Amino acid sequence: MPSDETRARPPAFTRPDAGGDDETWRALPQWRSVPSLRLGPDPDEVRGHRAGPSPSGRHPVVCGRERLVVVVAHPDDETLACGGLLARAAEHDLPTVVVVATDGEASHPDSPTLDPETLAGRRREELIEAVAVLHPAARLIRLGLPDGRLPGHEDAIADRLRDVVDADTLLVSTWRHDAHGDHEAVAQAAADVAIETGARHLEAPIWLWYWGEPSDVPWQQCAVLPLTPGEIAAKEQALARYPSQTAPLSDAPGDEAVLDEAMLSSFRRSYETYIESGLRLSPPPRPAPGSVPVQSHAPDRADEPHRSDTPPRERRLPDAAAVFEELHRGDADPWRTASSWYEARRRALALALLPRERVASVLEVGCSVGELTAALSDRADHVLGVDVSETALAAAARRCAGRSVHFERRRVPGEWPDGRFDLVVLSEVGYFLSGAELAETLWRACRSLTADGALLLVHWRHEVAGWPLDGAEVHGAAGRVAAEHDLTLATRVVDDDVLLDLYRPRRRRTLAEEERTGRG
């Protein structure tokens, strides 16, 4: 980290040598154990209340808080560190304040074309435009403190934060160990105010991804926020508002871009990473021991779907658990899975895509009455089927009696099962999720796979009445998340009515190569 002497003179920060490319970061096995950040009501604080208005009736809640305050050192830090979170807060209509400590005048200390004052003015304009993209209603506060010299100004930052932070605040700052004096000063000020007020404090690393190694990451304190396609797009649009940082000021030496493509790739992930001591997250509950064929993992409160994040048409998402429980109570087989030729053909197509004749373990998300589950059990040593409907699961248990199948009532993504699977199947389920829920579901599915595991998606190609997403959108999102997990599209079937995609590890032998090797 920079020494005190280094921090005492501008520029206080020199970009370090890269510690590893972002593809290497994304492929780390440590991500498999990182939980996702709960952005709905905190069940410990609002138990029994429904999602949407908070217990006080004033505002929606995010991470159990009624407002968001983001404090960073420089213009563009807010976009790099938490642009996706800001976009989500906007969709939740969450009151938000963005505090920026400096105007970023020291980003190009050797520029022959722009003096610090002119550069500061340009970066102020960029900041205003970027925040307007991410959260148009956010209040922007600029402190005008000296860029590169924030260590020693922690009290000034903390004093301003006290005006906008209280116990109902989610406070997000840069990371205190980012090897950048300004970032560390902001984080320390935020930590002090969080302790005083009872605010929840998350820290977002920026330069860690460029200089760091896996051993530098406090994995046990990390959580990820899977982003929707709309949030990723908003973040990209906001980054485009910072040409002074992402492009050279001129061709002259000293005017080089601060954020090159190698650096930017770390902020184009389909998720954002946050660090917190004493995280209060929502990891999936562990399955209860015993041999009961159907187990319930519903929380002991009214479990509501997330409000939509993008697009706006998702804002009034139906309650899937209630909808499907009522549907199955009124009809023993609502989709005629046991009698419809379409359903039988869809199952046959799905089974034909499986990369191996037999696998050890399968997870089927949204198993309904168990017809596909039964077919999968013919190709697997064990199948776990999960669904939100108790009635559907009871029917599935009867359908699969005597097979090596286990059923559990779970609502994904928040109640994702533990364990690793050779195959995860999402069949006719993705469009019944919000954009945020789908992003997290895909994230968890990819991280649940064994080293040679496969992800299979099967979805109706036509409009799904009453629900915000369609099959094409679900499969498009899956492709983006799969690519970040080093999975590639191995097989695609496009039928008039149904779309099937199979994702497998990028670095693998084909089935024919494996068979030739096996024959010697």
Image (spheres, helix red, strand yellow):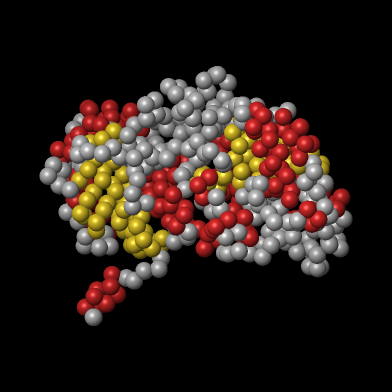
Q: Position of residue 394 (x, y in %)?
A: 20, 34
Horizontal side of 8 relative to 235 (left or right) equals: right
Q: Is residue 66 above or below residue 369?
A: above
Q: Residue furthest bottom?
A: 520
Q: Residue furthest top?
A: 56
For the point 50% across and 47% down, the residue is 220
Horizontal side of 170 relative to 388 (left or right) equals: right
**Quadrant of the rendered structure where residue 164 is?**
top right
Q: Position of residue 78 (x, y in %)?
A: 66, 45
For the point 25% across and 63% down, the residue is 356
Label tally: 0
For the point 44% across and 24% down, the residue is 47
For the point 39% across and 36% down, the residue is 467
The front one of 455 and 166 is: 166
The front one of 476 and 439 is: 439
Q: Position of residue 277 (x, y in %)?
A: 56, 40
Q: Can residue 351 be spotted in the picture?
A: yes
Q: Position of residue 36 (x, y in %)?
A: 47, 43
Give the quadrant of the N terminus. bottom right
